[in-house]
Image (spheres, coloured by chain):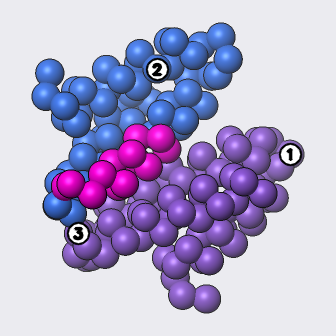
Chain colours: A purple, B blue
């Protein structure tokens, strides 16, 4: 699966929520993952701004999709 | 205060946490605000990618500062 794609982030949201279901609600776990991923993405100075924005848009699209499940 | 500056986001994190302290922990409220702000910023197609990244970096910097309080 392509890294930083919508499908990649969807899978990671679901995995992270599942792995933390004893401590956090699905919403809380997803927010924790979202915040840490954005923080990681924007601090990766290797990438062009267009690539950073694309990755964050994919993360946000995946978040909106998984929240609806 | 300049919109989308670090100080602007710091103030908003503190306000949002205070306003929601009856429902959410400080951490939960900050995460909710962070997710909704990133979602808003990246869906603002008016701005250049460099400006979007700058705003998100300021949001993240403010988040890290307020979390330490």
2 vs 1, front mark: 2
Q: Which mark is residue A22?
A: 1
Q: Is residue A43 magenta?
A: no
Residue A36 percent coordinates (x, y): 50, 53
Name the residue that disc number 3 marks. A49
Highlighted range, magenta: B35-47
Residue A69 percent coordinates (x, y): 78, 57
Which chain's residue wears label 2? B
Q: Is residue A65 left or right of residue B38?
A: right
- When asked about the image quadrant of residue B3, the answer is top left
Q: What's the residue at 43%, 57% (across, down)?
A: A38
Which chain's residue wears label 3? A
Q: Could you tell me if residue B57 is visible in this image?
A: no
Q: Quadrant of the N terminus of chain B?
A: top left
Q: Main secondary structure of the magenta part?
A: helix
Neighbor class of circle 1 (other Cα within 10 Å; few <14, some 14-19, many 20+) is few
Name the residue that disc number 2 marks. B16
B57, B20: nearer the viewer: B20
Residue A18 percent coordinates (x, y): 81, 58
Helix, strand or loop status at disc 2: helix
Same chain for mark 2 and mark 1? The answer is: no
Mark 2 and mark 1: Cα distance apart in space:
27 Å
Which chain's residue wears label 1? A
Mark 3 or mark 1, earlier in chain:
1
Q: What's the residue at 41%, 15% (across, down)?
A: B15
Q: What's the residue at 78%, 51% (across, down)?
A: A20
């Amino acid at each position: 699966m392509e890294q930083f794609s919508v499908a990649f982030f969807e899978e990671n949201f679901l995995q992270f929520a599942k792995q933390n279901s004893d401590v956090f609600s699905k919403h809380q776990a997803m927010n924790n993952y979202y915040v840490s991923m954005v923080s990681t993405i924007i601090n990766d100075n290797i990438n062009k701004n267009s690539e950073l924005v694309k990755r964050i848009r994919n993360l946000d699209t995946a978040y909106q999709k998984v929240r609806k499940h």
